[in-house]
Amino acid sequence: MSASRSSCKIGSRQLDLFPRSKRPTIPLADDHPLVLLTDTVDWTEMEARAQQIRTKKLKSAAGRPPHLRATLGALVLMAIRYRPYREVQDQIRYYAPARYLCGLTESDWTPDFRTVHDFAQLLGEDGIKLINEGMLTHAKILGLVDTSVAVADMTAQEAAIPHPNEMGLLGGFLLSVERAAEKTGQVFKTFLDKAAGTLKTAKEKVREYRLFAKTKEVKDRVMLEMAKLVEGLNCRLGQTLELACAARCKLRRHAIVAHHKLCCLHRTMTDLLPQIRHWLHTGRVAAGKIINLHISELYSIVRGKVGKAVEFGVSWGITRLRGGFVLATMARDRDDLHDSTFAVRAVEDLTALFGKAPHSYAYDRAGHSAENIARLRHLGVRDIGLAPRGHTAWAVKGQVKKELIRERALVEGSIGTIKRQRYGFNRPAAQSVAMMGVCGQRAVLGFNLGKLVRGIARKRRLEVVW
């Protein structure tokens, strides 16, 4: 009995005379990276830009005033080292430098993970880009960035989706419809009861395709049969959605989300089925091919890389300034950004931000054309380092040409650094293109903040481990 009691004891057997304090008082070192960052960033300007984007997007100013300083600090904390929202909440609550970054050292309050997520969602890709531009302007005032030399390139942000294939999309449609319809009321439960036989047959087709279809002829036959089954199911789903709309069924909470999901799945599959049939009949991928049921705006990007010829996600334009700081521009759709257009747009964006075009500018051969060179000269670029195609001569030569080639090579390193897991640019945990834009701009902001801290540390002759 005594052994069992002693084994149940928790903690030290030596009792303290006074209860141990749970409020540690540890001074923060002046050379800590988060302390340097907090003391360097112009929070007043950052709050003004955040308030500007909030006023633009909110329908009403009613409600409690936001904790802009704390939520901006949480956004910066996620930018410099990507973590899930719940871990960010824990770090701000228990990690002293993180509380200092959020301006909460004299407070017991901590922003909830939902608050941080909703704030990032409200700012959006354009709001975080606006904050990043303000930070670059501040870095220029500190003398850490040289806007007279710039280079640009295109890259792809991969989405966290499985490799797209027709049978996978059709099978995923069945599972998604079945799960969403179970949460959307009696009308859709009746729809599931009537479609039970079709769902069972379609699932058997998926199993047959994956396990027993070994030749192209058999695969195409099973795919065509599966497409017919899914088309009939999708048609009945559309009729059920119209019936539920006519009956004005009252939905609450999760049922509203599930109903919206069913509407999106119906529209997506209506567009996808003709594309699948086009591929079965011609053997060619249809233009504007849908590659994901849940994020239909994603598209394939042909890169031609060794081991990765195609990437699935969205396109980005990256502009690098001398000093290492970068700006990012997200393509709104698959036709928005191309090398031939972004080669000029990058200079136009820099001109709008800093008031004048860079003196020297470089881009790879995909952006070379006589028209682009003429437009860049009109914008005020003196040294144009667009890599020529074929036997065309360079527009610059000598030392200027060597310098621009060297700067052009450095942008690849910046893109590779942004795509590290630390910043969360590639394959972000986002379920929409809008949140992918937020993650992309936040990664670029974190990269630039690292440059800012290291630049300040060099000026003060401090050694900082970032």
Image: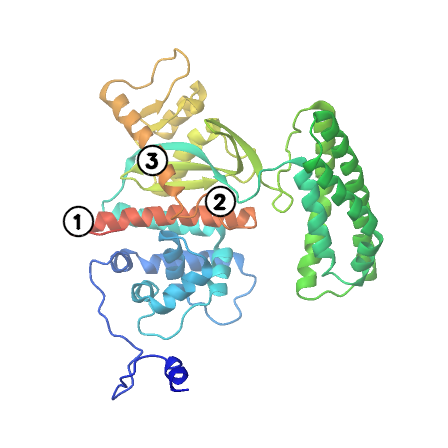
Question: How many marks on residues?
Answer: 3
Q: Are dots 1 and 3 in contact, CB under 8 Å? A: no
Q: The residue tagged with tag 3: helix, strand or loop?
A: helix
Residue at screen point 42% across, 67% down: 67
Q: Position of residue 301 (x, y in %)?
A: 53, 32
Q: Residues within 10 Å of mark 2 (few under 14, many from 20)?
A: some
Q: Position of residue 116 (x, y in %)?
A: 46, 62
Q: Nearer the viewer, residue 197 or 358?
A: 197
Mark 1 lies on residue: 459
Mark 2 lies on residue: 427
Give the CA separation, mark 2 to mark 1: 36 Å
Quarter in which the N terminus is drawn: bottom left
Q: Among all residues in the image, which is located at the extreme right?
A: 194
Kind of residue at badge 2: Arg
Q: Are dots 2 and 3 in contact, CB under 8 Å? A: no
Q: Residues within 10 Å of mark 3 (few under 14, many from 20)?
A: few
Q: Quadrant of residue 217?
A: top right
Q: The residue tagged with tag 1: helix, strand or loop?
A: helix
Mark 3 lies on residue: 413
**Mark 2 or mark 1, which is nearer to you?**
2
User: Is residue 284 toward the left or the right of residue 86 in the image?
Assistant: right
**Mark 1 or mark 3, which is nearer to you?**
3
Q: Position of residue 449 (x, y in %)?
A: 32, 50
Kind of residue at badge 1: Lys
Q: Among all residues in the image, which is located at the extreme top?
A: 391
Question: Earlier along the polypeptide chain: callout 2 or callout 3?
Answer: 3
Residue at screen point 23% across, 47% down: 455
Q: The residue tagged with tag 2: helix, strand or loop?
A: loop
